[in-house]
Image (tube, rainbow, N blue to C red):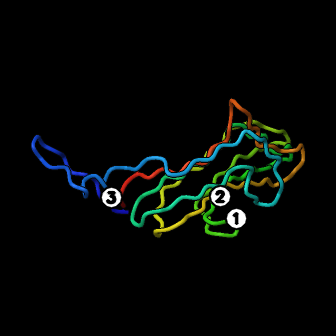
């Protein structure tokens, strides 16, 4: 992926629209949730983790999906998966990550998925989703006022 950075400015130089458009635009979409989510074995959009933004063609977008407290299944070799999708959970999978346990014991952890992508111009919907390999021990994505989940899309600049 080629990057199109800005040039170094010198005193007296004119800042052009092209120069200004090479700067990052920052946060373009954000969702948080303080509502805990009980995991199932089906990959499902988690509570509050959907955002829609208007993409500009040929720009880099950083997508971050963060779950602050993950209680895994207590089944041996269990896994909690989080994934980022475009459009819906049957759509294009952008990235994924996993938190697993090796023994038949529930563990607590934090899980984070990050990706940098370009999109066609237009409306883009991003979904944060999760599932578990077993519901033994009631695995949960724990969220509250002090530990909210986060789905964030940032414009990093031109590709």
Q: Are marks 2 and 1 in contact (CB under 8 Å)?
A: yes
| Residue carrying label 2 | 127
| Residue shown at the point (68%, 33%) measured from the top left | 147
Across and down, in percent, residue 94 comes to: 58, 62
Q: Is residue 120 left or right of residue 95?
A: left
Q: Secondary structure at mark 3?
A: loop
| Residue shown at the point (74%, 37%) measured from the top left | 143
In the depicted structure, whether residue 8 falls above or below residue 145: below
Across and down, in percent, residue 93 comes to: 62, 64
User: Would you identify the image quadrant in which residue 4 lies?
Assistant: bottom left
Front residue of 56/110: it is 56
Which quadrant of the rendered structure holds the C terminus? Answer: bottom left
Front residue of 143/17: it is 17
| Residue shown at the point (82%, 42%) measured from the top left | 103
Reading the chain from its start, which is encountered first: label 2 or label 3? 3
Q: Are marks 2 and 3 in contact (CB under 8 Å)?
A: no
Q: Secondary structure at mark 2?
A: strand
| Residue 59 visible in rendering | yes
Q: Secondary structure at mark 1?
A: loop
Reading the chain from its start, which is encountered first: label 2 or label 1? 1
C-alpha distance separating marks 2 and 3: 26 Å
| Residue carrying label 1 | 89
| Residue shown at the point (70%, 42%) measured from the top left | 33
| Residue carrying label 3 | 3
C-alpha distance separating marks 3 and 1: 30 Å
Front residue of 19/128: it is 19
C-alpha distance separating marks 2 and 1: 7 Å
Which quadrant of the rendered structure holds the N terminus? Answer: bottom left
């Amino acid at each position: 992926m080629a990057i199109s950075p800005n040039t170094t400015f010198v005193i007296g130089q004119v800042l052009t629209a092209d120069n200004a458009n090479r700067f990052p635009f920052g946060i373009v979409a954000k969702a948080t949730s303080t509502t805990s989510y009980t995991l199932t074995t089906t990959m499902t959009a988690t509570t509050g983790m959907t955002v829609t933004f208007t993409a500009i063609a040929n720009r880099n977008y950083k997508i971050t999906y963060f779950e602050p407290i993950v209680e895994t299944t207590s089944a041996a070799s269990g896994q909690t998966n989080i994934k980022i999708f475009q459009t819906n959970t049957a759509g294009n999978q952008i990235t994924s990550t996993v938190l697993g346990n090796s023994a038949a014991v529930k563990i607590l952890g934090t899980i984070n998925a990050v990706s940098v992508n370009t999109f066609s111009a237009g409306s883009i919907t991003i979904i944060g989703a999760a599932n578990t390999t077993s519901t033994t021990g009631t695995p949960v994505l724990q969220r509250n006022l002090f530990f909210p989940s986060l789905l964030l899309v940032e414009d990093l600049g031109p590709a």
